[in-house]
Image: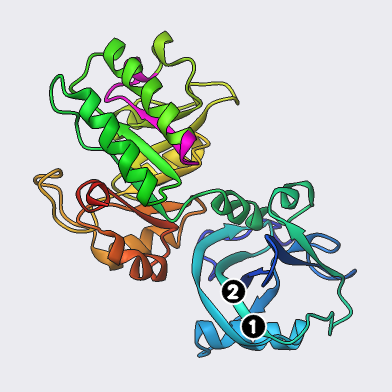
Amino acid sequence: MPSTAVEATAPAIPVVAAIIHHPDRSEILVSRRRRGQHLENLWEFPGGKQEPGEARFHALARELEEELGLRHLVARPFFRLTHDYPDRRVALDVWEVRSFTGEPQGREGQEWRWVSIDALKALDFPPADLSVLQALDLPPELLITPEPAGTRQREFTERLDALLARRHYGAVLLRAHALPDDRYAELALRATVICERHGAELIVHRPTLEGLTAARLQPFRNRHLSSAALASLDEPPFDDGIRLSASAHDAFEVQRAEHLGCRFALLSPVRTTLSHPGRPALGWAGFQAISTASRLPLYALGGVGRKDFAVAREQGAIGVAGISDFWAG
């Protein structure tokens, strides 16, 4: 009797999909898989199989014209992942479509609709698309703060406030390893007020698992695991109310972060940096090899600046993260 589980060495089926933004409203177009199809009746981001030898964008354009009658796309890469179903492995290549011509229509008899981003989670999606929904909650740029200088924490918070007032970062990772836990918690409370004022989420980060689980950090929902803390865990250290992220340096650590239920990981170093002495750089090819084999959204970190966003997306990153270039504003 044939196995119902996909073989570990089975080639992945290349599939393109689109997050199509409404031109006037904060809504995304989704379609429903027809009866009799694989994963029938589930909602999905429109797309289909990439033909052998076909370029990624050409496959996307062809599928959206065939399925929905949309043409002249303005699109950019969003997220790439590999997912194993019981009977097949899928390499999903997701693009963001910000502009198009034509009125959407179900050319293949499929149901479709515009849905607000908040309402997407109420729909039934295939398992592979759940990672895409998770990635939609993440900002394209993540600011990692430099260490506050000694007792000049007021200057630090004023600088953070001014920076977020002129440039929107959706997430701020508060890195202050030199501070003891009590002073770090005080700084994090002040930084939270600033982040909330500017529509950003604060992520607390301590160098040890003991520090991250300290009672003083109980008010903070977003917590970041160092690579050392990540290596020490086999099961999630918090209940479902805590949203975890992690620092990772290789495919094994990315897999562990995924196993622990992290929302995302910072994968570094892409380039050689002083903050990672002796650690070989992944390069963009190394980053892509890890990102496309994972379901976890990854930020490119290490010698990376905001100008690298486009190339990072091409290599499968959900966004870019860093300190110096990002703190400069």
Q: Which residue is at a point 27% across and 51% down the rendered structure image?
A: 326
Instruction: Residue 157: give x, y in percent of width and height.
Output: 29, 30
Residue 247 magenta-highlighted: no
Give left or right: position of 171 versus 261: left
The one nearer the camera, 133 or 295, is 133
In front here: 281 or 224?
A: 224
Spatial CA distance of label 1 from label 2 is 7 Å
- Residue type at numbered disc 1: Phe
Q: Is residue 15 visible?
A: no
What quarter of the picture does the N terminus occupy?
bottom right
Which residue does the numbered mark 1 point to in the structure image?
100
Read off the residue under disc 2: 97
Highlighted range, magenta: 197-212
- Marker disc for residue 217: none
Q: Is residue 208 left or right of residue 49?
A: left
Q: Tag 2: residue type?
A: Val
Residue at point 78%, 47% (across, down): 122
Task: Identify the residue at horizontal 60%, vertical 26% (top origin).
Answer: 240
153 or 11: which is nearer to us?
Answer: 153
Does the CB distance between marks 1 and 2 fall below 8 Å? yes
